[in-house]
């Protein structure tokens, strides 16, 4: 059952047609942060039966022997499976499952399983992020019908969310360091288990998270983050590149994007890199705004905050993240290898997005399950224009405790119609994410994209 909490009704409807700013929360609500609420707005206390423990700070130090640059050792390696949810017993647990999870048990009854472990509320961020979040709580506002925000920087903008739009902005702006270089790739897996790995070299510069950034400067510069992606393999695609500038006020200036094509050796503006445009080299298994579970402008949907629910989500997946695991170990027919996954019961915010009248998208409805401790979307159930479940996506999370930040090591998108899936973030056979890079703004220009593409 979806529950009700003191500061929010179980269902909060939102229909933003005007351009008026949304009111901030009170100082009294903000003062709950770090007390009855975690510094990012989750409930500090355990749940009623103790199956979800109290949050006590998350992971605050790395395991002995860890060095920056290592794949992250499992701090909970000694934990054992409590029980396994299967097609035979999922009905016993269905109040804690999403419709998408249930659909996978029905689609793959012989092989899809969820090994459930002790819940570890491992999510943590730097103290500076906690302090920024508390400041944001009383000053952050949605603007232009929710298609932008002001008064926030570095931390979670709306730790005490009052509507679904605020909650989805919390996911978009959750802390992932100031900048990161990612190596790895994605694989579109056929029903028989065949796949080819598409390699990527990606850089993300998050202006919103910079130490010296102010809300006023952020709004004036009007860039939340800059993202650059270059295909490294296979040879026929190598050198193809994408550049994105994500804006703060998306009505004043929508997302800017450019692509570099190796055949033409030209950089072209790409205004269609948004919404339901097919994702890069994804075999039509995800949309552009599926990337990172959800990204981009929220303006095509009405957003409803349904409340909180206790759900089994993919958390602390260090085994899946390990350098001793090969891609062939992970990428099995129909779904990734269940033996490498870890599921835990966590409290999540449930946010429902329904397509606005007069707008077009391949998803008529999307239901997001957002971790209360990190604001990472853990599960996304997507419905087509007939109202039928179409796709389900899971974020398999770990705490990158050298930052620290809770983020996914792998995002997996299941297409229920084609019975295929897409795995994004494969890095077991690559160098680990580098959060210590500090690229310059000039490295995220169309000119820089062309120079890199011609190398």
Image (cartoon, helix red, strand yellow):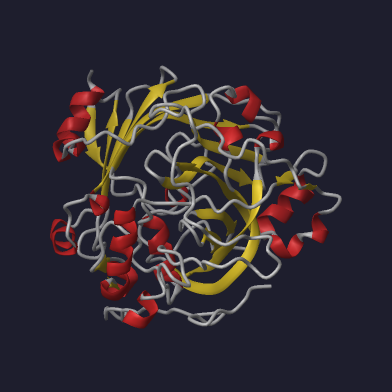
Of residues 338 and 79, the one nearer the viewer is 79
* Residue 217 falls in image quadrant: bottom left
Locate the N terminus and report the quarter of the image it occupies.
bottom right
Residue 189 appears in the figure? yes
Residue 245 appears in the figure? no
* Residue 346 falls in image quadrant: bottom right
Q: Tell me what residue is drawn at x 27 percent, y 68 percent.
A: 135
Q: Is residue 52 above or below residue 36?
A: above
Q: List x then y, in percent, for residue 351.
A: 52, 67
Locate the C terminus and report the quarter of the image it occupies.
top left
Q: Is residue 123 above or below residue 240?
A: below
216 with respect to 398 (left or right): left
Q: List x then y, in percent, for residue 317.
A: 58, 40
* Furthest residue in direction front, as rendered: 64
Q: Tell me what residue is drawn at x 66 percent, y 59 percent.
A: 98
* Residue 234 falls in image quadrant: top left
Of residues 76 and 265, the one nearer the viewer is 76
């Amino acid at each position: 059952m979806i529950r009700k909490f003191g500061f929010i009704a179980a269902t909060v409807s939102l229909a933003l047609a005007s351009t008026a700013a949304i009111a901030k929360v009170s100082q009294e609500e903000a003062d709950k942060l770090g007390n009855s609420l975690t510094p990012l707005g989750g409930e500090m206390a355990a749940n009623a039966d103790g199956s979800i423990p109290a949050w006590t700070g998350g992971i605050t130090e790395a395991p002995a022997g860890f060095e920056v640059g290592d794949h992250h050792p499992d701090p909970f390696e000694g934990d054992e499976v409590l029980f396994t949810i299967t097609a035979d017993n999922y009905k016993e647990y269905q109040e804690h499952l999403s419709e998408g999870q249930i659909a996978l048990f029905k689609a793959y009854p012989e092989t899809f399983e969820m090994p459930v472990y002790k819940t570890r509320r491992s999510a943590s961020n730097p103290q500076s992020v906690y302090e920024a979040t508390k400041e944001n709580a009383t000053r952050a506002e949605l603007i232009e019908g929710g298609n932008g925000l002001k008064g926030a920087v570095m931390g979670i903008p709306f730790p005490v969310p009052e509507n679904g739009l605020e909650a989805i902005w919390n996911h978009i702006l959750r802390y992932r360091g100031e900048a990161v270089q990612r190596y790895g790739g994605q694989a579109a897996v056929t029903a028989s288990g065949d796949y080819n790995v598409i390699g990527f070299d990606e850089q993300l510069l998050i202006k919103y998270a910079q130490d010296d950034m102010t809300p006023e400067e952020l709004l004036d510069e009007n860039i939340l983050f800059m993202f650059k992606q270059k295909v490294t393999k296979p040879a026929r695609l190598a050198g193809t590149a994408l550049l994105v500038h994500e804006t703060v006020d998306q009505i004043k200036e929508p997302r800017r994007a450019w692509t570099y094509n190796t055949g033409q050796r030209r950089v072209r503006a790409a205004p269609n890199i948004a919404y339901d445009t097919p994702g890069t080299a994804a075999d039509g298994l995800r949309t552009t705004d599926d990337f990172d579970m959800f990204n981009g402008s929220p303006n095509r949907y009405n957003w409803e905050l349904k409340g909180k629910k206790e759900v089994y989500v993919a958390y602390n997946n260090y085994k899946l993240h390990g350098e001793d695991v090969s891609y062939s170990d992970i990428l099995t027919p129909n779904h990734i290898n269940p033996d490498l996954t870890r599921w835990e019961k966590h409290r999540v915010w449930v946010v429902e997005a329904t397509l606005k009248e007069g707008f077009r998208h391949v998803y008529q409805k999307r239901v997001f399950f957002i971790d209360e401790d990190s604001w990472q979307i853990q599960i996304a159930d997507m419905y087509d224009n007939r109202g039928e479940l179409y796709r389900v996506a899971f974020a398999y999370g770990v705490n990158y405790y050298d930052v620290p930040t809770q983020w996914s090591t792998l995002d997996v998108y299941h297409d229920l119609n084609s019975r295929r899936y897409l795995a994004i973030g494969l890095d077991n056979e690559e160098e680990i994410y580098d959060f210590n890079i500090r690229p310059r703004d000039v490295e995220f220009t169309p000119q820089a994209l062309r120079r890199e593409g011609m190398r």
